[in-house]
Structure formats: C-alpha cells, structure tokens
Image: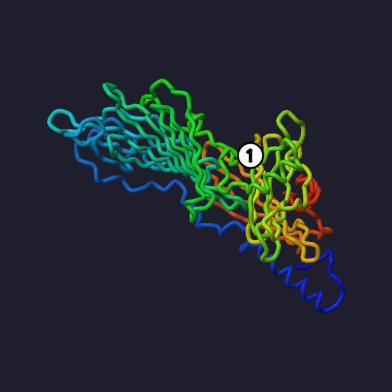
C-alpha cells in the first residue's frame, strides 16, 4: 500500500492513490473499525400511556384503586414470595396519563382469599421519562426490571427482593446490571451481578457477543449493608454505588496471554514497565501477527504510558518496532485500550469529567513502502446524560487520507430522539507516523473540533 505522501507522478501511481483512498474511506465509513452511527430510529412517542393491565384479579384491582386512586396498573407479575400455598402479586402502577414515575405494589391474599396491598415502593427511576419498569416473581424473589435508554453506565438494571429466614419485611437481596456494546472502535458489553446478602460481586466484560471464549470475569466483594427494606429503597443508580461500580477494562485478565518471547523483549527494552493491555493481529500484508502493547511506567516513576509495537518474525521471535509518545497526555485517570483488526491498529482513550464521557479513537495503518504505521483516522465522542433520562452525544470522525469529516449530534430529550449530521472537508496533513506520536487531540484541532451546532 502506498500512501498519498509518498505518491509520485504517473498513471500507475495515480491508480494506486485511488485504490488506497477507497480502501481507507471504506474502513473509516463502515466496513472497518470506525463505523458511523446507525440511521436514526423512529422518534420515540412522547408521554404515551400504555393500556391498563386488565389481567388483574378483580379483588386486586379494587384494592389498588382504593389505595392508589390517581394511578393505573400497567403490568404485573404473580408467584410465590413467602409461602407456597398462595400467589402473591407485584403490580406496576403509574400516574394516570403517563407511563413513567411508576411504583411497584405488592399484594397478598387476606381473609376470604381477596387481595390486599401489603407494601409499595418508592418511585422507580424518578423523573426519567423514557424509563420503563416491569416485574416478575420467581424462585421466591421479586424482580424489578428497569430500562434506562441511553444511560451511559447501564441500560438494564434488575433489583431483586426477597424474605430471609424470619424477616417480616421484603428486603433487597441482589442487583444485576447490563450494558450492551456500543459503537466505539473498541466496544465491550458489560454486566455486573452483586449479592447483597454475602457481598459477592462479579463483573463481566464481553468484547464480542459472537465469541463467548473472549468473555472475561472479575470476582470481588463489597461491604455488606444493613438490610434495605423494599418500601425504603430508592430506585436510582446512585443508591447502590459500590455494588454497581464498573471496573476499567485493564482490571481484567487479557483474553490472550503475551507470548514469552514478546514479554522478554519488552522486559529487556523497557525495564520495570508494566504491560497494561495488548492486542495481537495482522498489520502487514498477510504476514504473522504483530503485537501492540500499552506500557505503564515503573511503579513510583513519573510519566505517561506509551505504546510499543512488536513485529513478528518468521522464526517466531519479535523485534521492536515503533514506540509512541505519551498516550494519555497527563490524563492519569484515562483508560487506554488497543486493538489490531482488519489490518489496522486502533488506540482508544476514555476519560470522565463533569462534562461527560470523552472517548478518542486513533486508527493507524501500515504504508506499503516502509511498513511504518501512519495515522489515517481519528474519532472523538463526548457523551453526557442526566438523571431525567435526557442525553446528548457528539461524535466526529475524520479521515486523514481523504480529508472527509463527519459530525453527528444525537439527543434524547423528554422521550424524543433526534439525530443530525454534517459532512465537511479538512485540509489533508503530511503523514503522521506512530513513532513518537503524542496522543493529544488538541494537536489535531481541525480533525477533532466540535464546530457543528444544529
């Protein structure tokens, strides 16, 4: 592959330029690692009231109408919560005229077999208009499922309540949460399951839904809390901070171990450095799998992580290739991930601050002349979200070979989803090589500028 900075005159050279441009445009526009956001879905309906749940027993419907005259049932689950000889009911109720700000009422059978309200919850996901709540009862547990569209942490959270031993009160015994993989260049599905009775916690990182072998787990424990009664629990993400705290991808064991020869080379050339993450894959033609490794400075040393490229040799050994400049630009809290796929290297940094989540992805490909990796694309994301369920996401993607730039703004406000985009051109730069490259988006102002204001 011969890149624009190395092209000479002549029809053959021009033809190669067209091929390279087409390949890179394809990579950066959908078939490669930097994929554009999907087409906008149909706008979400605003304040649509679901049909009343008409499947409730008559005595349960009467008890609810007396206890909650300004609410209507929108769903329910039945099963055995405390004893096996009678069905209990869990009913989701929302204020008349809306489907959010719901509560959950638990009904038990009283004298004569009629249902009565035993307890009820606080508002589930208060103020979150697009949120939905469903319930079910199974295995003597009440599960309250909350869907939070566009939530940056977890879109699906399930709270489980049960009776323990001689407890008279329904109490929180477990929580699970899941977030599907997004459209970032290096995306992971993430799930958490925490047992509030014994404190056990399992975090699951799922790099690809199609390859269960690459799923990784991290087991830990959290401090036990005093019992949390069902009617006292606040159904908000902040209510269970430690139990739902996500771990960085670097905390998980790598899906593939580093070959011994590669580890020895890194140890010899970067004494004391720690390998935070690595990825292996084909970068040069159809050759062997090279390795990109993120190296943190020795413990106690000042400095930023760097990326080292290890080039595979025919005899199975490795030689040191390019070494980058600082990866995090003095952002000590930034998370760095690397991925080699589709003959491209992607380096992704993620950081969080008061303005939201910042993701920057850099894509490198090998030149045909020398095999050196050069920067061919950059993608930035700024995502913010509030407790009411409103969110905003600004994504820009720049192709440094063609000069194409695409800005996309996606918003969810009061249940309405809106997506607008703007295509533009930037001035092509001279080739930027991986060797010595400082991963500082401010040095790529034209490519990363958020100047689209729809």
Name the foreground residue: 453 vs 427.
427
Q: Which residue is mark 1?
A: 356
What kind of element bears circle 1? strand
Q: Image height check: is 443 above or below 271?
A: below
Q: From the viewer's perspective, is 294 left or right of 40?
A: right
Image quadrant containing the N terminus = bottom right
Q: Position of residue 176 (x, y in %)?
A: 43, 38
Residue drawn at x 77%, y 31% is 302
Residue sitting farthest toward the left = 112
Quadrant of the rendered structure where residue 37 is? bottom right
Residue drawn at x 33%, y 43% is 74
Q: From the viewer's perspective, is 142 left or right of 454?
A: left
Q: Residues within 10 Å of mark 1 (few under 14, many from 20)?
A: some
Quadrant of the rendered structure where residue 253 is? top right
Q: Position of residue 31 (x, y in %)?
A: 61, 64
Q: From the viewer's perspective, is 169 left or right of 110?
A: right
Q: Position of residue 41 (x, y in %)?
A: 52, 57
Q: Position of residue 199 (x, y in %)?
A: 43, 28
Residue sitting farthest toward the right = 9
Q: From the viewer's perspective, is 325 left or right of 36?
A: right
Residue 358: tell me if it is visible: no
Name the foreground residue: 433 vs 162.
433
Name the foreground residue: 206 vs 152.
206
Residue drawn at x 78%, y 58% is 372
């Amino acid at each position: 592959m011969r890149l624009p900075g190395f092209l000479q005159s002549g029809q053959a050279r021009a033809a190669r330029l067209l091929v390279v441009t087409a390949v890179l445009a394809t990579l950066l526009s959908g078939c490669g690692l930097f994929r554009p956001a999907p087409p906008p879905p149909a706008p979400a309906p605003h304040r649509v009231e679901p049909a009343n749940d008409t499947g409730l027993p008559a005595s349960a419907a009467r008890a609810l109408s007396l206890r909650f005259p300004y609410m209507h049932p929108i769903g329910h689950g039945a099963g055995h919560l405390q004893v096996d000889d009678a069905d209990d009911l869990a009913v989701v109720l929302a204020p008349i005229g809306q489907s959010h700000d719901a509560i959950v009422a638990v009904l038990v059978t009283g004298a004569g077999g009629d249902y009565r309200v035993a307890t009820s919850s606080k508002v589930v996901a208060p103020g979150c208009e697009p949120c939905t709540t469903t319930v079910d009862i199974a295995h003597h547990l009440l599960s309250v499922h909350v869907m939070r569209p566009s939530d940056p942490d977890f879109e699906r959270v399930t709270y489980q309540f049960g009776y323990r031993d001689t407890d008279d009160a329904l109490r929180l015994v477990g929580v699970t949460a899941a977030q599907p993989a997004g459209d970032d260049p290096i995306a992971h599905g993430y799930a958490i399951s925490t047992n509030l009775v014994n404190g056990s916690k399992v975090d699951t990182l799922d790099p690809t839904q199609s390859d269960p072998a690459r799923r990784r787990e991290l087991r830990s424990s959290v401090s036990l809390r005093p019992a949390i009664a069902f009617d006292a629990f606040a159904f908000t993400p902040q209510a269970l901070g430690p139990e739902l705290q996500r771990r960085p991808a670097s905390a998980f064991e790598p899906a593939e171990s580093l070959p011994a020869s590669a580890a020895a080379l890194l140890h010899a050339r970067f004494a004391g450095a720690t390998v935070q993450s690595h990825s292996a894959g084909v970068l040069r033609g159809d050759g062997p799998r090279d390795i990109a490794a993120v190296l943190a400075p020795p413990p106690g040393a000042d400095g930023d992580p760097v990326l080292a490229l290890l080039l595979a040799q025919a005899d199975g050994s490795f030689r040191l290739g390019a070494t980058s400049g600082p990866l995090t630009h003095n952002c000590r809290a930034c998370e760095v991930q690397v991925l080699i796929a589709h003959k491209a290297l992607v380096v992704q940094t993620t950081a969080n601050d008061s303005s939201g989540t910042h993701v920057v992805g850099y894509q490198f490909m090998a030149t045909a002349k020398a095999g050196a990796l050069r920067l061919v694309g950059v993608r930035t994301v700024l995502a913010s979200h509030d407790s009411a369920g409103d969110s905003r996401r600004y994504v820009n993607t720049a192709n440094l070979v063609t000069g194409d730039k695409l800005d996309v703004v996606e918003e969810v406000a009061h249940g309405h989803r809106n997506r607008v985009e703007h295509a533009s051109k930037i001035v092509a730069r001279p080739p930027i090589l991986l060797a010595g490259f400082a991963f500082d988006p401010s040095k790529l102002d034209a490519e990363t500028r958020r100047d689209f204001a729809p």
